[in-house]
Amino acid sequence: MKQNIFDIKNESDFQTACLETFRYQYENVEVYRKFVDYLKINPSEINEVNDIPFLPIEMFKNHLVLDKNSEAEHYFQSSGTTQINRSKHYIADFSLYEESIYKSFEQFIGKPEDYIFLGLLPNYSENTHSSLIYMVDFLMKKSGKPENGYFLYNHQELFDLLQTLTEKKVILFGVSFALLDFLDTIESQNLSISQSQNLTVIETGGMKGRKEEMTKDELLKIFKQGFKTDKIYSEYSMTELLSQAYSLGENVYKSPNWMQVLIRNTEDPFSYVEEGRTGAINIIDLANKHSCSFIAAQDLGRIEDGAFQVLGRIDHSDIRGCSLLVS
């Protein structure tokens, strides 16, 4: 493929890169080619992004989704229980993933080198097949700050550290239920986090049966009160992607220039709904150069003013997600 995805500047660049990627992956990713052929679609007749077929995300559970010209020894695996067949996303080029992580973070939040990173997550050595933890670990390495660390069950240690870092720029990454557990712990001890303009909390989603389900708005309200901040950021990605979208508050996400979300009709997966209408999420991730860049996800969402919201899961889709990392 000719174009560097990180050089995409406008919609025309994006459209060109999508069509180029589609043709390459049709020729070189066997499961995707079989899927397109099964739909009786002639790839030479695909001239618009909206006409590109999106591979159901479930295909990562039972098939190798990998460019035949690539070799991949390592993979990311979706979180889940032993009863669930987990998705595997084989990674042929970690440098591509790392550049995507860095540039997305830099675009929406800032340079990783300027922040201390704390995680209410398992550490990388315990979860080498988690794309989320690989991302956080990479950002910690770029940061290089001695205070960086994981505090999944060490709530008192995390609380004490936060009290000493009110003058430093801190990012706290956490799955939703772990952030709630931390706030419950300090509340039970009648402790309160000192207000800090320099603390940025980024929740990565995931209740998934660990706690009573609540809406994202309800969750963000609790986090705002507990962490004494006007904004809670969110990160949206998944095992099958190599890019991240970020919400800088209010559950409204923006994507980097090489990633885009489309909203398909839940009754007709080959058509799209109007802006503002709810449907199922299709994701274009051009960083998935060596697997599949066109994925039909199992999340519901809608698009307004160039940003998208995630509204929940499609009924009967599998329970999965980052919260199950610590099952």
Image (cartoon, rainbow, N blue to C red):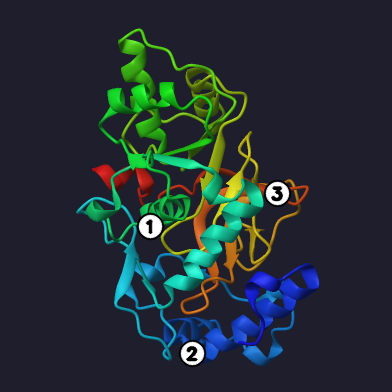
Kind of residue at badge 3: Ala
Pick whichever, 65 or 141, lies toward us.
141
**Foreground: 185 or 322?**
185
Residue 290 x/y as whole percent: 47, 79
- What x and y, as percent, mark residue 284? 60, 67
Residue drawn 53% across and 26% down?
Answer: 167
Can residue 266 be seen from the camera position used here? no
> What amino acid is at disc 1?
Tyr
Q: Earlier in the sequence, mark 3 or mark 1?
A: 1
What residue is shown with label 3? 307
Residue behind mark 1 = 134
Q: Which amino acid does the dot numbered 2 rest on? A: Asn
Residue at the image point whose x is 80% and y is 73% from the top: 12
Q: Relative to 286, is 143 above or below?
A: above
The part of the image, by quadrant, that contains residue 94 is bottom left
Q: Seen in the image, is 268 located left or right of residue 101?
A: right
Check disc 3: other Cα within 10 Å, few if <14, some if 14-19, many if 20+: some
Specify few, some or many for label 2: CA neighbours under 10 Å numbering under 14, 14-19, or 20 or more.
some
Q: Are marks 3 and 2 in contact (CB under 8 Å)?
A: no
Left of 180 or right of it: where is 28? right
